[in-house]
Image (tube, coloured by chain):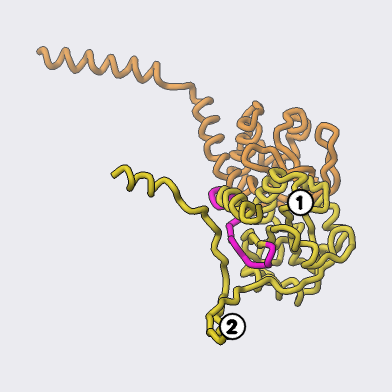
Amino acid sequence: MAFGMAACTSSPERKLPILGHREPVTKTTIDGQTVVDTIYQQIPDFEFLNQDSALVSNTDFETGVYIANFFFTHCPSICPTMQRNLLKVYQQYANDDRVKFLSHSIDFKYDKPSVLKAYADKLGVTDHRWQFVTGSKEAIYGISDHYMVYTKEDDTAPGGYDHSGYFILVDKDRHIRGAYDGTNDQQVELLFEELAILLKEYE
Amino acid sequence: MRLRTGLVLFGIAICYWALWACQDPHSIRRAQYIGNGKKVYSTHCQNCHGASGEGLGTLYPPLTDLSYLEENREQLACWVKHGLSGEININGVAYDTPMPGTPQLTATDIAYVLTYVTNSLGNAMPLFTIEEVRASLENCE
């Protein structure tokens, strides 16, 4: 019985799953063995204009993990709550380059870099760790699919754009390791927990 | 005979209890307005202004500055209904994000939410009556 208890207390370190589409791929190793490997969904290469009118790309995010979301500056519905919650994570990891933030604006008509800059300043973002980016409609809406976040131009939606408020946690290999509803307090709590777990993987 | 005495005494006891337990009508009304106002607030205002009226950075202003609310009392209903644009200054801090209106709110809803905001987020101001809100809305700039 004591042995059983001891076995129970030593649990393996929890690792986050890799989310999204996956494909098994058969390979042949050097010594003629066939192995099946998995190709996971990956965020593709990207390049966007940020709030300082500078180009940022995937290489700027590969040094650490990052949290991505989709919003627009004059969004009256879910964005304020979403960004308020993401700000909490940003503040928690202040001065910590291991965690970055990437907010994509889905209002390619209005959210020019200067508008994004004013927004970022007012929100309380003081450094490069949180990037607010804009791009062409195709680029932004296209990449939202890869993040598994719903975005759509919609006249009937408040503000003219409809989108989901998910935070997507991406690791150094551009794999999606978590998806959290940014308007839901419990899911934001979960993000805090799982972000810490993911960072442990790189220690 | 005993039963009747018992019932009368019981009735008197109930009356005393009722008189003692009743709050004055004004505080009941205030509590009702604040309770209803909280619901309106969480549905329509909380996302930008925050659960405790703290606002968000300098994007969305706080609603906790009593002197600002008092100075602008007549305009508050207009702002809730029709929104507000241009720069405002609360306690030396500037805010210029346009506020969208919530035109679907009735004068009653607005009276509830204004009473809540001016009485529950660390503030304490006289109750907003529906009549007062209607009068304000007639004079929106």
Q: Residue at x 82, y 53 (%)?
A: A128
> On the rendered structure, is A51 left or right of B73?
right
User: For the N terminus of chain B, which image quadrant?
Assistant: top left
Residue B90 picture location, percent across and down = 81, 35
Q: Which span of residues is magenta-colored?
A: A172-188
Answer above or below: position of A46 versus A80: below
Where disc 2 sits, the SS reads loop
Q: Could you classify mark 2 by the number of other residues whose Cα lies within 10 Å: few (under 14), some (14-19), or many (20 or more)?
A: few
Front disc: 1 or 2: 2
Answer above or below: position of B113 versus A120: above
Sooner in the amino-acid sequence: mark 1 or mark 2 = 2
Residue B79 picture location, percent across and down = 73, 45
Residue A157 seen in render: yes
Label 1 is placed on what type of residue? Asp
Residue A181 picture location, percent across and down = 58, 57
Magenta-span inclusion, residue A182: yes
**Front residue of this view, candidates A199 and A95:** A199
Residue B102 picture location, percent across and down = 67, 52
Look at mark 1 in the image and give the residue it sits on: A97
Q: Colour of chain B?
A: orange
Tell me, by letter, which chain the rendering colours yellow.
Answer: A
Whether marks 1 and 2 lie on the same chain: yes
Q: Residue at x 62, y 60 (%)?
A: A166
Disc 2 chain ID: A
Look at mark 2 in the image and give the residue it sits on: A29
